[in-house]
Amino acid sequence: MFIEIDFESEEAIYIQIRNQIVMGIATSAFREGDVLPSVRRLAESAGINMHTVNKAYNMLKNEGFISLSRRHGAVISIEADKQQDIMNLKENLRILLAEGYCKNISKEEVHGLVEEIFAECGE
């Protein structure tokens, strides 16, 4: 697994890690049951603090993307609570779409983006 950290980005490093793992799951680079690198190994290979990786892994665990255990480490484990996931997605989209609306992005342009993103994920 290769995580690219952009140290010049305004996006927090733990968010970069989280987002890259989520994208990896969406694009089938990671599959159910795959084991992620240990916190120590990922921190060393990326040149970052272990606490940063730990924060990203805990976020992924809380969001239902991975499970964490002392014995097995971080494992891709998608929890299926679709109704809750839809509600969470709706809340996130509400803000993003409001921002787009304020910047005169049309519904058609949003639909086009949705189609493009789903195509990237293999759908």
Image (cartoon, rainbow, N blue to C red):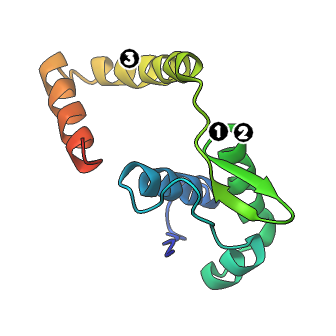
Label 3 sits on residue: 98
Q: Disc 1 to disc 2, how far (Cα)? A: 5 Å
Residue under the image location 58 percent in, 53 percent down: 18
Pointer 2: residues within 10 angstroms few (<14), some, or many (20+)? few
At label 1, the amino acid type is Gly
Label 2 sits on residue: 62
Considering the numbered disc 2 on the image, is that residue within a helix, a strand or a loop?
A: helix
Comparing 2 with 103, the one in front is 2
In this rendering, which labeled residue sits more in front, label 3 or label 2?
Answer: 2
N-terminal-most mark, 1 or 3: 1
Residue under the image location 48 percent in, 24 percent down: 89
Return the x and y of residue 120 as percentages of the image width and height.
24, 49
Pointers 1 and 2 in contact (C-beta within 8 Å): yes
At label 3, the amino acid type is Ala
Return the x and y of residue 76 as percentages of the image width and height.
60, 54
Viewed as shown, does residue 45 lie left or right of 101?
right
Label 1 sits on residue: 64
In the figure, 10 relative to 95: above or below?
Answer: below
Comparing 26 with 93, the one in front is 26
Q: Which of the 4 quarters of the picture holds residue 47? A: bottom right
Label of residue 75 in the image: none
Q: For the image shown, how many numbered marks are present on the structure?
A: 3
